[in-house]
Amino acid sequence: MYRLLRKIYGVFVRVCNIPHAMRIRNIEKRAEKLIPFYQDDISVRWLRAKERFNRERDVTIFAKTEKSMGVGDPGYMIDEVGECNVAVVYKDEHDVIARHTKRIIMMSSSAKKCRFFSEEEYQDGSAGGIENDEVLVPAMDRQSIYDFLAVARNHGDWSRLLVPQYGMLVGFAAGQYFDVFSPVENEIFVDAGAFDGRTELEILKWGDSNIKKIYAFEADPANFDQCLAYYEEHGLTETVTFIGKGLWHEHAVMKIGNGQSSAGSRISGDGMNEIEVTTLDSEVGDEKITFIKMDIEGSELNALKGARATIMKNRPRLAICIYHKPEDICEIPEYILSVVPEYRFWIRHYATNEWETVLYARCL
């Protein structure tokens, strides 16, 4: 009876997934038509990784595809680990989380200061004790981690225990937004999604004396306050024109989610805070914009529509995030080409999970 119920449930799940599978297939067909517009093999490799993730939801695809930075890059940085030595304990070394964690660490700057051992070896002491300069990372499913917490406490390693925030370690590569294009003279840069203001220092580091002006947009009220404080602290108020509005395809008042100094704040029908949204065209007027960066939690396509005149007139280089929605990998480049057909594309990916995929565009 149990087997019959499982079989019926499996059929039910497959039937329910048919609309999603058809949607993903349509996205893939549209994305494949754009391949002639991509300028290198790395871009196609990351496009295919995004397609496969949308289809299979297997986060390990991104670590298997490896880094986008090319020869000589410093590797992934694991923010959760920092500069510490790492002791990774696994329940089953063949488990997907354990394998994913090991691959990330081997591709990161933590590779030479990491050791792996089983939970059994940890419990019987054959792995040796956890040193003062080590963090203990459980590479296990969430329930196994809960069970392991008591073990770590009994071993006196509670203070050195690091539980990955997202279930498995996430690595980030450097250079996001700035590793494809070089600065040009008199850069007028649009930073859509300023978050806490730190991107502006990265822009100035990248462009140095070439940066003439930065338009920074941040809609989240809590993030807005953080940005103001950061700009004042670092003497950026003369270079940065800071606009506390969201970018959209029209002027409106909308709601935004989170609203608690989060990197994930997005326009939402049931958000906690009302915000003003505007178009880039109306905010920058006749300024000769040279570079537009957008990381605005799924609002990128609408924001690009509100920047149509600016893009047509100035043909700026673009760095647009395309990981917030599956359709982004086809809809955003399709729209850019509909505005200026001479644009060509690159894709780079900066994390070992599904986040931080950037579409770069430039007129050739």
Image (cartoon, rainbow, N blue to C red):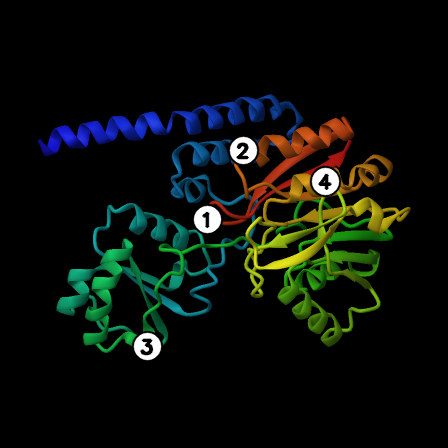
Tag 2: amino acid: Leu
Tag 4: amino acid: Leu
| Quadrant (top left/top right/bottom left/bottom right) for the N terminus | top left
Judged left or right of residue 363, residue 347 is: left
* Whether residue 233 is situated above or below residue 191 in the rendered picture: below
Q: Position of residue 304 (x, y in %)?
A: 72, 40
State the residue position of label 3.
159
Marks 3 and 1 sit apart, C-alpha to C-alpha, by 27 Å
Which of the numbered marks, if any, corresponds to residue 352?
1
Q: Comparing marks 3 and 4, which lies closer to the viewer?
A: 4
Marks 1 and 4 sit apart, C-alpha to C-alpha, by 27 Å
Q: Position of residue 112 (x, y in %)?
A: 39, 61
State the residue position of label 2.
47
Tag 3: amino acid: Ser
Element marked by disc 3: helix
* Labels 1 and 4: the sequence-earlier one: 4
